[in-house]
Amino acid sequence: MQTTLPGPTVGVVGGGQLGRMLGEAAPPLGMDLIVIDPTPEAPAAPVAREQLVADFDDREALRELAERVDYLTYEIELAGTGVLEAVSEETGTPVHPHPDTLRTIEDKLVQKRRLEDAGVPVPRFRGVDSLEELRDALGELGYPAMLKAREGGYDGRGNVPIESPDDVAGAFETIVEAAPDASPADPSGAAMVEAFVDFERELAVMGVQGDGERDTFPVTETIHREEILRETVSPARADPAVRQRAREVALDVLDVMDGRGVFGIELFETADGDVLLNEIAPRPHNSGHWTIEGSLTSQFQQHLRAVAGWPLGATDRRSPTVTANVLGDVEQRQDATLRNVDVVLEADGAAMHYYGKREVHRLRKMGHITAVGDDDAPDELLARTRDIRDKLTFRSD
């Protein structure tokens, strides 16, 4: 394949912050983006050529999108898998990663079974179709454990910790109520439960598959609170042997994935130095935002290259890099106005990324800041980045 410019037009299902950053990465490559999202003036709209306002699984709108672009991809797992596949077959427009991959990923139980069968190390897990099955599984897996919705959860939504037998009934009710195709009368297919992992730290690897080539970005440490990613540290503060093992697991995961693109691969480093897979996102991921300033090629440019079948960019890290998510700090929804931004703009080596969302509420991801360093002092860089981030506020007083 010979690459020429102007480049292709890529259609993106989803116009949130990931679509926005894909839109920012496209122009230097000579590419255009058209996004589809049900929210008018979605975050990606200002940087895309056009936004189609429609649901993620709207067949007619997706067909229109496919007819106007050279490739289709997605930045959210809520894309209608069957609809994407059908539209691709009707129009001849390829979808990457392949809808089969999305089909595997979107059901966490199917995902875990497929990966376990492929030899990827995963925590012990069970599918549970009733409260009685959950109690039986916990008798085997023990307490504490994590109950997960099989479909639809993200940013900690759809995950409920179970600390003791007293929590079981309430946790199961919470998951079933949130499940798209389950009800208290028929809770089957709603949930899976995982054994608690006594982890030393959480890690992430952004993997990428292109046209006959694949690679990984450097292993990154991820720091969560309330099941939401707060900061990332690259390089991860783990032993070199652990980082090497994390990369090996990530490459094994890529062997299971079908189609081109970037994959966010979340991992646990256990207390005894093993590495277990947590979850996979078949798209750019929050844990890879550091690559915009910190890597020779960002995850967003890499995703576009891969989807189009272009040669992949170098994944080398430029320097130690920390990101910190900017989350909503107000309890009630209100218009979003971020204050004290000067603390970021005045800080050496810091960069502000604002997602352009119109409303803010507690813990909503509104942006992130990145800070780069020139030494091997990740603790100090993390502390400095947190200090900058913590001075930002959406409060109006």
Image (spheres, grey):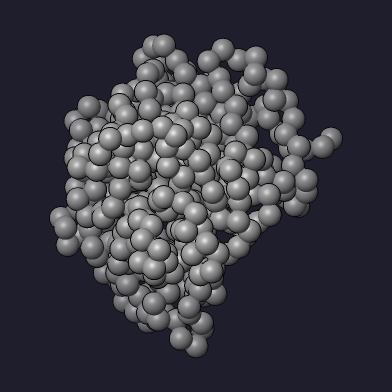
Name the residue nearer the viewer: 65 or 116. 65
Residue 310 drawn at (x, y percent): 31, 37
Q: Position of residue 56 (x, y in %)?
A: 53, 62
Farthest bottom residue in view: 185
Looking at the image, residue 50 lies above or below residue 102: above
Residue 350 versus residue 333 in the image, above or below:
above
Q: In the image, what residue occupies the spot 40% across and 51% down?
A: 71
Q: Is residue 157 visible?
A: yes
In the shown orientation, is residue 28 left or right of residue 356? Answer: left
Residue 242 in the image, given as x and y percentages of width and height: 23, 34
Q: Residue at x 20, y 33 (%)?
A: 244
- Would residue 122 be visible to someone looking at this image? no
In the picture, measured across the screen, residue 343 lies left or right of residue 117, that is: right
Is residue 267 left or right of 388 when viewed as pictured?
Answer: left
**Viewer-proximal residue, 19 or 339?**
19
Q: Quadrant of the N terminus?
A: top left
Furthest residue to the right? Answer: 397
**Which residue occupies the foreground of this view, 196 or 190?**
190
In which quarter of the view is residue 234 placed? top left
Q: Position of residue 114 (x, y in %)?
A: 23, 63
Q: Residue at x 20, y 60 (%)?
A: 116
Residue at image position (36%, 38%) is 305
On-image quarter of the C terminus: top right
